[in-house]
Image (cartoon, rainbow, N blue to C red):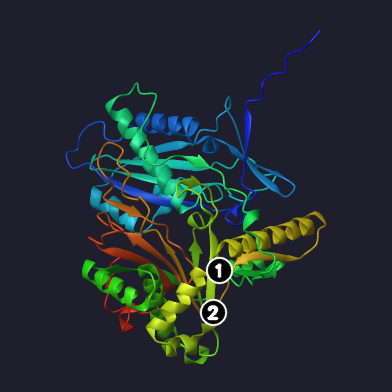
Amino acid sequence: MTTDVPKSTETRYSISNNVSYLYQVYCSYMLVYKNDTKADGFFDPELLKKSLNILVRQYYKPVAGWFQVSGEDIDVVFDSNKFNDPPITTQTLDMDYETVSRHVYDSNIELLVPTAPSGVIKPENPNIPMFLVKATYLESNEAMVLGVTYHHSLMDGTAFWMFMANWSALCKQLHGQSNLTEFDLPYPPTFGFPDIGHLHDPSKTFEHPEYSLVDADQCFKEFQPGAEKIVEKILEISVEQQQALRQQARDFGVSFTELLCAVLWKGTNGLRLELNPEIGSESSLYSCAVNPRARVGVSSSLCASPVINTSCERTVSEIAALDLRDIARLVHEAIDKCSGDYLFSSFDFLHQQRKQELYDERNNQIGKKLMLVYVCRKPVKCTVSSSRTFPIYNTDYGFGAPEYVRPPFLPFDGCMRIWPTPLYDARSSKAPLQIYVSLPENVDLSQSPLLAQFKCCAN
């Protein structure tokens, strides 16, 4: 007698071969959609829910899964018979468009973004949602704010905004024809990060100053903001200024983004030195996130969180003395060193440290914890992430593109986010570009000869 074994409906998607465990946090955004005609049926919540459920069940199944930890391995587990559909909540507020827009500009995430649980991936915390949504409607029917939160271990910024563009495209198609079962998505939804062992060159060794080892019992203290209040300031770079910077970047032999990073680093370094002349011999740190997809030959649409970091460090006085060309070359070299063998070394370094941390935890030992160096205290930090090429404003759910998309406020000293405006095209620079800068409130950007040229927008 034979007994048929039921076919397993469970699938595992490993995230152990990227650096996901470093990004056990949620990232949140707010998208503002204006209803100029006050039309009925604006962003029907049932349509939002239906389109999101179809997207994750049909194309992004790991988003409907959950994390599972087994020893050193982290998997995303999903079951075709037991979907963990992303939760969507709604609220209706008695306020007008201008008022709700002010809440968005002020980054009022408590009001407009879904509350996420702890994002720490561990065996005793299995129910971590990958993606959460909060749709805020107005009594006046003037607008809707879409607040979204995603777990950084599953997707990086590139993957997330392609996910959002795919969701909006699917919703738009359903809006016109509700019985559709096949959809035309602008980006192919592909999960997984390939093994990069073939990139290993045993003849080369690298240091990784972009990461810092701190005592485990002091780890959380490194995240404290310190005595200075960190506020956000927004710089706007006009079309003409972008064109001038692109020409200057070509003259320097660097990219536009690398030159922009150099301007930010030198400009803020000079302001901090002027405020505190005694820090001249101390550290001035530049760091940035690097998307390694192209460097390891995988699709830019690959849905994963493989971002690594790179950094460069000099003294505050050295950065003050160097001209802009030399600083741009330092930034270029920091990014350019991220070759295939460097990527393997970085991943291997992170994984080996992860093993040691797990060993210390199992044996109740107080060891070292690995942290990104930009959250550790330094006299001067310039930590840049660029979102200018993401399809942020290609998110039309059938009711037009968003009026404004709010990036998260990053309360770390020196964090700077390069962000597109609604009509921005990374290839043509036909619209202004913005930079969200987190610095102590006593740092006046208008006092920098390099930064004063840019318009400082009211937040």
Pointer 1 local density, CA inside 10 Å: few below 14, some 14–19, many at least 20: many
* Image point (46%, 85%), residue name: 319
Give the position of the N terminus as an image quadrant: top right
Answer above or below: position of 170 versus 390.
above
Among the 4 quarters of the image, the one containing residue 88: top left
Q: Position of residue 214 (x, y in %)?
A: 68, 70
Among the 4 quarters of the image, the one containing residue 283: bottom right
Q: Position of residue 25 (x, y in %)?
A: 55, 53
In this view, the residue farthest toward the top is 1
- Residue 313 is marked as 2
> 371 or 75, which is in the foreground?
75
CA separation, marks 1 and 2? 15 Å
* Image point (37%, 50%), residue name: 30
> 56 or 43, which is in the foreground?
56
Q: Position of residue 444 (x, y in %)?
A: 35, 79
* Image point (58%, 24%), residue name: 81
The kind of residue tagged 2 is: Glu
Give the position of the C terminus as an image quadrant: bottom left
* Residue identifier under label 1: 375
Q: Position of residue 250 (x, y in %)?
A: 33, 73
Under circle 2, the secondary element is: strand
Answer above or below: position of 129 versus 230.
above
In this view, the residue farthest toward the left is 37
Under circle 1, the secondary element is: helix
Residue 119 visible? The answer is yes
* Image point (30%, 48%), residue name: 32
Q: Earlier in the sequence, mark 1 or mark 2?
A: 2
